[in-house]
Image: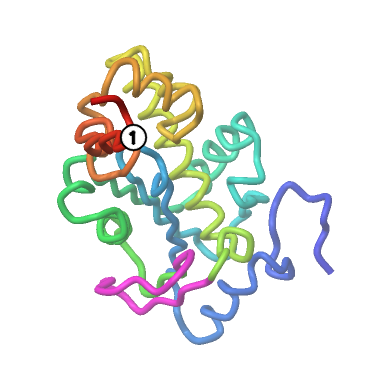
């Protein structure tokens, strides 16, 4: 029986079931892959891939969306400190997102993250299946709540992207990137209307596109002549 109060995961923990199944099938280097930043109106989409070695203490990770910002930063440091851990980051720019669409850009970010790993033979991917990955893979819907490796990847990707958005806020003040991280909050939409889109906004996303190319006004058929 696992110790739920332990700071580390054990192979008896439910969150390690997908990894244990892969190890039982003969795979040795199992990577969790997740992305962050599909929905925002600004900034890149980022993916992370994390391979924890078997037999070393794994931090007690969780779905990044269930953690506070401070907890994510702390866990990201703990993940990076695991002996022998492998971490790959893939980042796809706003320009590429606009050119190939956000789904394809997300898949590209995942592939880039995986390609930065030195040793990997199987992938656990959050969400739906991703085509053209360089290794065998298994897609797990809501995988960041079901797989420790995917949860770790979700944390690493979120912390990395949040840091990028804080940097963009310094480069392009006025939009509040440091607070909302590019998501379409009321404050962000208000800034968009006042300031117009920046170079870091996704021009293909409707709220941004409609500011750049507002729809023609409907004529008032009942107005005065």
**From which residue to which does the magenta span run?**
125-140
Q: Which residue is at 39% across, 19% downward?
A: 191
- Residue 32 at what x, y percent from top left? 47, 62
Q: Which residue is at 41% across, 70% downward?
A: 123
User: Mostly what secondary structure, the magenta segment?
Assistant: loop
Using the image as rendered, state which of residue 190 and residue 166 is in the foreground.
Answer: 190
Q: For the C terminus, which image quadrant?
A: top left
- Residue 22 at what x, y percent from top left? 52, 79
Residue 31, above or below 201: below
**Can residue 134 be found in the magenta stretch?**
yes
Q: Is residue 201 left or right of residue 77?
A: left
Q: Secondary structure at mark 1?
A: loop
The residue that disc 1 covers is 222
Using the image as rendered, state which of residue 134 and residue 97 is in the foreground.
Answer: 97
Q: Which residue is at 27% across, 15% downward?
A: 171
- Residue 109 at what x, y percent from top left? 29, 54
Residue 6, above or below 200: below
Q: In the figure, residue 37 lies in which quadrant? A: top left
Q: Which residue is at 20% across, 46% downward?
A: 98
Residue 47, above or below 166: below
Crowding at mark 1 (Cα within 10 Å: few <14, some 14-19, many 20+): few
């Amino acid at each position: 029986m696992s110790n739920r109060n332990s700071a580390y995961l054990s192979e008896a923990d439910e969150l390690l079931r997908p990894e244990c199944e892969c190890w039982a099938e003969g795979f040795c280097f199992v990577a969790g892959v997740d992305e962050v930043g599909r929905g925002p109106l600004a900034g890149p989409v980022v993916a992370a891939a994390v391979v924890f070695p078997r037999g070393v203490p794994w931090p007690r990770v969780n779905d990044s969306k269930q953690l506070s910002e401070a907890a994510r930063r702390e866990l990201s440091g703990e993940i990076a400190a695991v002996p022998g851990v492998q971490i790959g980051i893939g980042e796809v720019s706003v320009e590429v997102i606009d050119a190939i669409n956000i789904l394809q850009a997300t898949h590209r970010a995942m592939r880039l993250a995986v390609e930065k790993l030195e040793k990997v033979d199987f992938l656990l991917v959050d969400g739906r299946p991703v085509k053209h990955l360089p290794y065998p893979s298994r897609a797990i819907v809501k995988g960041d709540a079901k797989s420790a490796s995917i949860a770790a990847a979700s944390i690493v990707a979120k912390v990395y992207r949040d840091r990028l958005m804080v940097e963009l806020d310094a480069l392009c003040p006025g939009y509040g990137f440091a607070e909302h991280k590019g998501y379409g909050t009321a404050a962000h939409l208000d800034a968009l209307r006042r300031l117009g889109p920046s170079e870091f906004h996704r021009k293909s996303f409707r709220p941004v596109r409609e500011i750049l190319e507002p729809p023609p006004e409907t004529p008032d058929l009942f107005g005065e002549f």
